[in-house]
Structure formats: structure tokens, C-alpha cells
């Protein structure tokens, strides 16, 4: 599944929301993608479009300077309408990539795998 983000927004630790880490974006049509995790939760909440949020575990996110690739376990494929991969493309010139990385590390800590292909 493909998703072209018009804007990528992150918050590694929202103190007002019980230390929730958040990554979200909208496409040009306003469709929403959102990943959230409270600091003390074991699962990550994933929301896509108008669908109800789902909880996922044991997944992988790969980040490079143009794409955020989310790979879910086969049993979670229903979350993405049967797909197990969601590729979100974005404009890195409008994104604070270190903050994106910090957010992804907070979301995936103990529940998933984070792979960075960002230039160092």
C-alpha cells in the first residue's frame, strides 16, 4: 500500500498526553495515518483513514530520507486492508529527521524493529 504524505508530524513524548509518542501524516486528500504509543503500553496504536484504531506488535519500520516503510506481521494484514506493507513517501526538506527518529525509537522500543537508512 502506498501513501503520499503532504506533511509528516511527530512528537517523541507528549507530556500533556501521558508521555505519548506520536507520528502522523495526511495525504493530499486529507486521509490520515497515525502511530501512537503511550510510554507504559506494550502495543502500538495504528490508525489509517476512517478506520478504527488497531493495536499492533512485532512490526518493522525502515526510514530513509524519502520513505517510511511499515512492515506488519501477516496476522495484522487486515489493518492495512490485506496488505502487510505501507510505504509512506514524504518531503524530507519539511521534516525534522532527528525528531522523527527519536519518535520512532520511542514507539518501537520493546515492540518492534527500527531500521535507519538516513545519511550520517
Image (tube, rainbow, N blue to C red):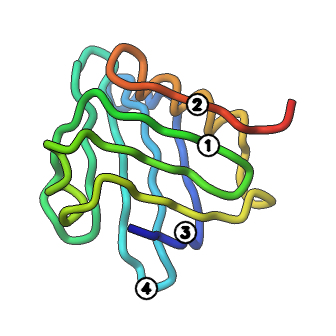
- Would you say the residues marked 2 and 4 are in contact, meaning their CB atoms lie under 8 Å apart? no
- SS at mark 1 in the image: strand
The residue sitting at 27% across, 69% down in the picture is: 49
Do the CB atoms of the residues marked 1 and 4 lie less than 8 Å apart? no
Q: Residues within 10 Å of mark 4 (few under 14, many from 20)?
A: few
Residues at marks 4 and 3, CA–CA distance in whole angstroms = 10 Å
Mark in front: 3 vs 2: 2
Q: Which quadrant would the C terminus be assigned to in this image?
A: top right
Task: Give the class, few, some or many, for how many residues have Cα within 10 Å of label 3's Cα (few <14, many ≥20).
Answer: many
Contact check, label 1 and label 2, Cβ < 8 Å: yes
Q: In front of the other: label 2 or label 4? A: 2
Asked if 14 appears above or below 52 in the picture, the reply is: above
Task: Examine the rendered structure and indicate whether residue 64 appears above or below residue 92.
Answer: above
Q: Nearer the viewer, residue 14 or 51?
A: 51
Label 1, label 2: how far apart the Cα atoms are: 6 Å
Circle 1 Cα neighbour tier, 10 Å, few/some/many (<14 / 14–19 / ≥20): many
Residue 37 on image: x %, y %? 32, 31
Give the labeled residue for mark 3.
Answer: 5
User: Which residue is denoted by mark 4 in the rendering?
Assistant: 29
Q: Position of residue 99 (x, y in %)?
A: 66, 35
Element assignment for label 2? strand
In the figure, 92 relative to 113: above or below? Answer: below
Quarter of the figure with residue 15: top left
- Percent position of residue 91, x then y: 71, 65
Image point (48%, 75%), residue name:
27
Q: Which residue is mark 2?
A: 115
Q: Is residue 10 above or below residue 1?
A: above
Say which residue label 1 marks: 63
Amino acid at each position: 500500500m502506498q501513501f503520499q504524505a503532504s506533511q509528516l508530524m511527530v512528537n517523541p513524548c507528549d507530556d500533556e498526553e501521558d508521555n505519548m509518542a506520536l507520528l502522523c501524516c495526511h495525504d493530499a486528500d486529507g486521509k490520515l495515518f497515525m502511530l501512537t504509543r503511550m510510554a507504559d503500553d506494550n502495543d502500538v496504536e495504528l490508525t489509517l483513514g476512517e478506520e478504527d484504531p488497531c493495536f499492533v506488535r512485532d512490526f518493522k519500520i525502515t526510514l530513509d530520507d524519502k520513505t517510511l516503510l511499515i512492515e506488519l506481521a501477516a496476522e495484522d494484514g487486515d489493518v492495512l486492508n490485506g496488505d502487510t506493507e505501507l510505504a509512506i513517501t514524504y518531503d524530507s526538506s519539511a521534516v525534522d529527521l532527528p525528531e522523527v527518529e527519536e519518535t520512532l525509537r520511542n514507539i518501537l522500543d520493546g515492540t518492534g524493529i527500527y531500521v535507519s537508512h538516513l545519511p550520517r
